[in-house]
């Protein structure tokens, strides 16, 4: 046995370096498999592996992970995409109590989440005492970074449970980060094949959207009322709004003096009026705001907007919330198909946006969600909105 120790150490070091490099790539084919880090010594069967998380922390985890909890915005969503959500033992508060804007298709499709015990509050405010008392307890805690509440190392120390941090990313300029998170989680949960199916579905959907347009649209569009850590009014937007990017549409907000790489900004009222888009899309999360604070009522009642051509021509349309406890990836894709139907009607004549949305929801979450979600927003999703 003693003669094998140097070989074991060298093998584990090599595999750890390989795993860590794989976790950093974020490429479609990259994945982490916990069993890859086991010792090659045939006389032993180590029960642990080491993984490097998004913060560069080297964390020892069980070689086989059976039970987990998901802390922070979007973490349980990713686990649901991987068809591994049946392995949770508890949830954070938002899954049981909901939120004022509760547009989360993964949760709508899985109402059983409401029946689990709570281990802490949403946005990463975990309760170490509640976690330590769980029976059965988790083998691993997945925690989204950056997040609020207790730091990963402190949480790990207080619970004696490995904490793996992830970062969410998006489908445009930070797509590698999204794929990294999905692949890292998939490797730990031994769901690598499903991770590749999810990434392939996203890539195929984006390619399909792009194949339907010959060149960039000459129609000027704007997305307003975009939710970001809560609802906002008409001036809330995203110059890098993913559905527009997929469809060759330039957001009218992109002409502001802000970086087009920013995920969220508030344009000035003057800039929006001056850009005078042909079509305005509204994120329906804004409708939860009272009175004239929400985007639709602002367009209806603020005289400054009344002469905009999108308002005069009644070309204002509702989209499902892009963000609700982090980005709804299925909503991003579904919104893109609806926007394509409005901006390029001939090219999307074979698409029924709601049917397509439910198809997307079933793939990601196992059940439809958009029609039920639309009830929360008084059927304003995928609809022409009254601004007169």
Image (cartoon, grey):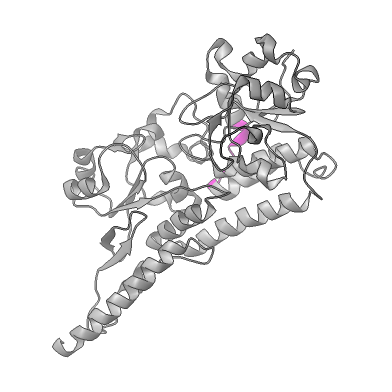
Residue sitting at x 32%, y 37% = 148
Is 211 drawn above or below residue 283 in the view shown?
below
**Residue 367 forms part of the magenta stretch:** yes
Comparing 335 with 304, the one in front is: 304
- Asked if residue 379 can be seen in this view, the reply is no
Quadrant holding the N terminus: bottom left
Side (left or right) of 217 relative to 157: right
Q: Answer whether residue 147 is visible to the viewer in this image.
A: yes
- Could you tell whether 96 is left or right of 323 in the image? left
Answer with left or right where residue 199 lies relative to residue 30: right
Based on the displayed image, in which of its 4 quarters is residue 267 positioned? top right
Residue range in magenta is: 365-372
Quadrant position of the C terminus in the picture: top right
Residue that lies at the very extreme toward the left in this rendered image: 2
Q: Is residue 374 left or right of residue 112?
A: right
Q: Position of residue 301 (x, y in %)?
A: 66, 9
Q: Quadrant of residue 97?
A: top left
How far across and how far down the image is residue 278, in percent? 77, 28
Q: Nearer the viewer, residue 97 or 271?
A: 271
* Residue depicted at 48% across the width and 40% down the height: 110
Q: Indicate yes or no whether the magenta region holds residue 34.
A: no
* The one of 84 and 299 positioned closer to us in this rendering: 299
Vertical side of 177 occupied by 74: above or below: above
Q: Position of residue 194 (x, y in %)?
A: 51, 60
Total residue callouts: 0
Instruction: Find the residue positioned furthest to the right.
Output: 346
Q: Which residue: 53% across, 29% down?
A: 227
Residue most extreme to the front: 257
Name which residue lies at 37% across and 40% down. Answer: 72
Q: Point out residue 54 in the picture as x, y percentages from the top left corner.
A: 37, 55
């Amino acid at each position: 046995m003693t003669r094998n120790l140097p070989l074991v150490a060298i093998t584990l070091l090599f595999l750890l370096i390989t795993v860590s490099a794989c976790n950093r790539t974020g490429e479609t084919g990259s994945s982490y498999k916990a069993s890859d880090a086991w010792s090659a010594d045939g006389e032993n069967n180590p029960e642990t592996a080491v993984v490097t998380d998004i913060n560069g922390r080297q964390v020892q985890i069980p070689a086989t992970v059976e039970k987990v909890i998901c802390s922070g915005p979007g973490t349980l969503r990713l686990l649901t995409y991987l068809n591994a959500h049946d392995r949770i033992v508890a949830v954070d508060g938002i899954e049981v109590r909901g939120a004022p804007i509760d547009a989360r298709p993964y949760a709508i499709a899985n109402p059983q989440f409401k029946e689990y015990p709570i281990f802490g509050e949403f946005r990463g405010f975990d309760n170490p005492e509640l976690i330590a008392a769980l029976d059965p307890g988790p083998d691993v805690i997945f925690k989204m970074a950056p997040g609020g509440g207790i730091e990963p190392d402190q949480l790990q120390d207080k619970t004696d449970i490995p904490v793996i941090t992830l970062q969410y990313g998006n489908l445009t300029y930070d797509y590698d980060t999204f794929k990294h998170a999905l692949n890292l989680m998939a490797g730990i949960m031994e769901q690598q094949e499903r991770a590749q199916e999810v990434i392939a579905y996203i890539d195929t959907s984006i390619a399909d959207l792009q194949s339907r347009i010959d060149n960039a649209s000459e129609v000027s569009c704007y997305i307003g009322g975009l939710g970001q850590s809560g609802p906002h009014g008409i001036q809330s937007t995203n110059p890098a709004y993913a559905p527009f990017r997929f469809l060759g549409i330039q957001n009218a907000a992109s002409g502001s003096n802000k970086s087009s790489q920013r995920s969220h900004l508030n344009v000035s009222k003057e800039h929006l009026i001056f850009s005078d888009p042909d079509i305005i899309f509204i994120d329906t999360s804004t409708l939860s705001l009272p009175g004239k604070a929400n985007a639709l009522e602002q367009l209806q009642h603020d005289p400054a907007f009344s002469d905009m051509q999108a308002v005069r021509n009644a070309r204002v349309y509702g989209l499902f919330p892009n963000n609700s406890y982090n980005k709804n990836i299925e909503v991003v894709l579904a919104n893109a198909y609806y926007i394509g139907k409005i901006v390029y009607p001939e090219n999307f004549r074979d698409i029924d946006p709601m049917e397509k949305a439910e198809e997307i929801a079933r793939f990601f979450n196992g059940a439809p969600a958009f029609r039920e979600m639309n009830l929360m927003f008084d059927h304003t999703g995928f609809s022409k909105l009254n601004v007169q």
